[in-house]
Structures are given as C-alpha cells and as structure tokens.
Amino acid sequence: MSVARIKKDDTVFVTTGVFAGQTGKVLRILPGRGKAVVEGINVAKKAVPKSQTAPQGGFVRREAPIDLSNLMPYDPDKKMGTRITRERQGGQLTRRSKRSGKLL
C-alpha cells in the first residue's frame, strides 16, 4: 500500500465520473478500500429504519465513498487539480503543488 496523496480536511478536485470538475472537502479517508468521503460529492439516498435517533425513519441523504484515483488535490491559485511533490523542510515532510509551487 502506498502513501496517500490526499488527507482529511484537504480540498480536492474530482477528475472523472458524473461529478467531474467539482471540488469538495475530504471528510474521511478509507485507506483499506482506497476511497474517500467528500463533502457534497457522490450524495446518495439511504433508507433509515425507525429508531430512537430517527423516530420517523425514511430516507437520509449522505455522501458515499469515491475512489482516490478519481481525486486530485485542489490548487486554489490555478483553480484546478494539481499533482504534488513531497519535500523535507526542517525535519518535516511538506506537500508542494507542482502547478503553482506553493505549499498545500
């Protein structure tokens, strides 16, 4: 398993599929499955049975996981997805945008 280039709370750009061109914030990473849950992307309806937390039951809209291969880190300067490079600065590993050269 390789190191993921996307982390929680990153803003990402969707490269392919129905949601191509949209951006969103990463809510969760599922490393074992190679997927991420992104805010506002891949929203699906889920049936919820009656319970104490949901006394009416019914349908709930929630984000479904999307494959990491369909996501790129978002570069706000260029307003598009970017590849990243890793650099060691002061003993810490930092991520830098290949498009604009700025730290992410």
Image (cartoon, helix red, strand yellow):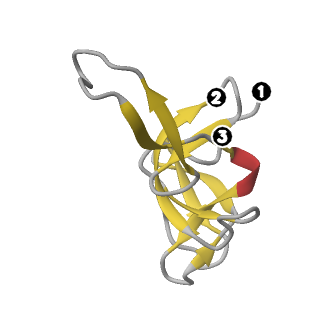
Residue 2 coordinates in the image, percent (x, y): 75, 33
Q: Which mark is residue 28?
A: none
**Residue drawn at (27%, 25%) of the image:** 54
Q: Secondary structure at mark 2?
A: loop
For the residue pair 39 and 29, the one nearer the viewer reads as 39
Mark closer to the chain start, 1 or 2: 1
User: How many numbered marks does the figure carry?
Assistant: 3
Question: Which amino acid, by three-letter code, is at mark 3?
Answer: Ala
60 vs 17, left or right, is: left
- Which residue in the protein does label 2 denote? 31
> Relative to 36, is 70 above or below?
below
Query: Residue furthest toward the bottom?
Result: 78
Using the numbered discs, state the Cα–Cα distance from disc 1 to disc 3 in whole angstroms.
Answer: 9 Å
**Mark 1 lies on residue:** 1
Mark 3 crowd level (few <14, some 14–19, many ≥20, 10 Å Cα): few
Is disc 2 in contact with disc 3, using a CB cutoff of under 8 Å? yes
Label 1 crowd (10 A; few <14 / some 14-19 / many >=20): few
The residue pinned by badge 3 equals 4
Find residue 22 and report its image quarter: bottom right
Q: Earlier in the sequence, mark 2 or mark 3?
A: 3
Observer-side mark, 1 or 2, equals 2
> What's the residue at 51%, 43% (across, down)?
45
Q: Residue at x 69, y 46 (%)?
A: 68
| SS of the residue under disc 1 | loop
Q: Disc 2 marks which amino acid?
A: Pro
CB atoms of marks 1 and 2 within 8 Å: yes
**Structural distance between the alpha carbons of marks 1 and 2:** 9 Å
- Residue 97, percent across and down? 60, 68
Tag in front: 2 or 3: 2
User: Quadrant of the image for the N terminus?
Assistant: top right
